[in-house]
Image: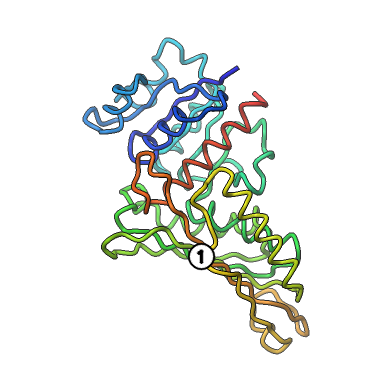
């Protein structure tokens, strides 16, 4: 049986997610409503044209819908501040909230890493676009070796960074760093985001630098390749930009890496990624937004089976 879902937030992310749900062919989800606060938003107008109910009265407008009680899952594509309010209401109403903001109230979910976990939670968090792109790689490395430190750099087109992204830059770095550790398995994580003003806009690029206490390049490369394939199952535009790079660290140099004990050595693993969007609603260069909506869709489909 398809689970009814609603989306709060009629901006780029919410609208793209709506289109992905409508295009999905597995029958797990039924699009019930798109919710916004701006009656003139393109997202709400598009929803109406596509036969989806639209309300510009925010979460209270959603709650007044006659079939609100039948809606099982609510995606929140608004902002950290708004989600802090929405989360309490949705929890009280018995809805599963899938949070696409960096509010991080609920546990982090990255479908390729822990998509089957946290079923039964009232609120799950999709981390950030940079987290969805890079945490799988950190997790793959951590499957093979201890990872004392991992650092990620997410570079996105300035045009694809809307008001919500810009307002949440601090939360982006903090939330991503926490998830690199708690989901990716690194003992210490760091995240950097770059808004690239280049014209024409560039496709999202992500770089992972991780220190692995291993010298087994073949095992590390195999784990990374397998993880890339797992992410591609729901984000087809996700790919390695070039071959995985390895740099050997002797004990003296390794001592400069946070968390590495004297005498330990290993490999610095550098992974360069590119994320091209599916262009369902957003331009193809906006892979940062596409990977968030694709991951949220996969998470809802996974959780719908447990509801």
Nearest the eye: 156 or 242 = 242
Location of residue 55 (image quadrant): top left
- Please provide percent x and percent y for residue 65: 40, 14
> Left or right: 60 with respect to 26?
left
User: In terms of depth relative to the viewer, which is nearer, 244 or 250?
Assistant: 244
Residue with the mark numbered 1 = 241
Depth check: 267 or 284 in front? 284
- In this view, 89 is above or below 112: above
Q: Is residue 233 above or below residue 223?
A: above
- Residue 148's x, y, as percent? 69, 70
As drawn, 3 above or below 297? above
Give left or right: position of 121 versus 76: right
In what element is the residue under mark 1? Answer: loop
Residue lying furthest bottom: 252
Q: Number of numbered discs present? A: 1
Q: Residues within 10 Å of mark 1 (few under 14, many from 20)?
A: some
Identity of the residue drawn at 64% across and 76% down: 246
Where is residue 2 drawn, in percent x and y? Answer: 56, 19
x, y percentage for residue 87? 49, 33
Quarter of the image that includes the N terminus: top right
At x 42%, y 10%, the residue is 66
Location of the C terminus by quadrant is: top right
Q: Quadrant of residue 16?
A: top left
Which residue is drawn at the image coordinates 57% and 27% (left, top)?
Answer: 26
């Amino acid at each position: 049986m398809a689970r009814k879902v609603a989306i709060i937030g009629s901006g780029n992310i919410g609208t793209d997610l709506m289109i992905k749900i409508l295009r999905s062919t597995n029958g797990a989800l039924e699009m019930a409503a798109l919710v916004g606060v701006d009656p003139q938003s393109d997202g709400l107008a598009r929803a109406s044209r596509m036969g989806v109910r639209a309300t510009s009265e925010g979460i209270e407008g959603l709650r007044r819908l006659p079939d609100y009680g039948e809606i099982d899952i609510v995606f929140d594509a608004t902002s950290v501040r708004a989600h802090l309010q929405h989360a309490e209401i949705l929890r009280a109403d018995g809805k599963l909230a899938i949070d696409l903001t960096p509010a991080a109230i609920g546990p982090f979910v990255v479908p390729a890493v822990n998509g089957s976990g946290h079923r039964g939670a009232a609120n799950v968090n999709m981390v950030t676009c940079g987290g969805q792109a890079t945490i799988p790689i950190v997790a793959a490395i951590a499957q093979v070796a201890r990872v004392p430190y991992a650092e990620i750099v997410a570079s996105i087109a300035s045009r694809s960074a809307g008001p919500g992204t810009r307002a949440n830059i601090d939360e982006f770095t903090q939330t991503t760093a926490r998830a690199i550790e708690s989901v990716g398995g690194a003992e210490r994580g760091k995240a950097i985001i770059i808004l690239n003003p280049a014209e024409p806009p560039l496709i999202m690029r992500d770089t992972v630098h991780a220190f692995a206490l291993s010298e087994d390049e073949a095992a590390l490369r195999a784990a990374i390749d397998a993880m890339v394939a797992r992410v591609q199952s729901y984000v087809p535009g996700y790919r390695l930009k070039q071959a995985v790079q390895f740099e050997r660290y002797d004990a003296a140099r390794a001592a400069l890496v946070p968390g590495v004990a004297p005498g330990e050595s290993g490999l610095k693993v550098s992974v360069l990624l590119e994320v091209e969007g599916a262009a369902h609603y957003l331009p193809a260069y906006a892979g940062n937004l596409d990977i968030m909506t694709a991951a949220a869709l996969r998470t809802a489909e996974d959780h719908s089976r447990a509801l």
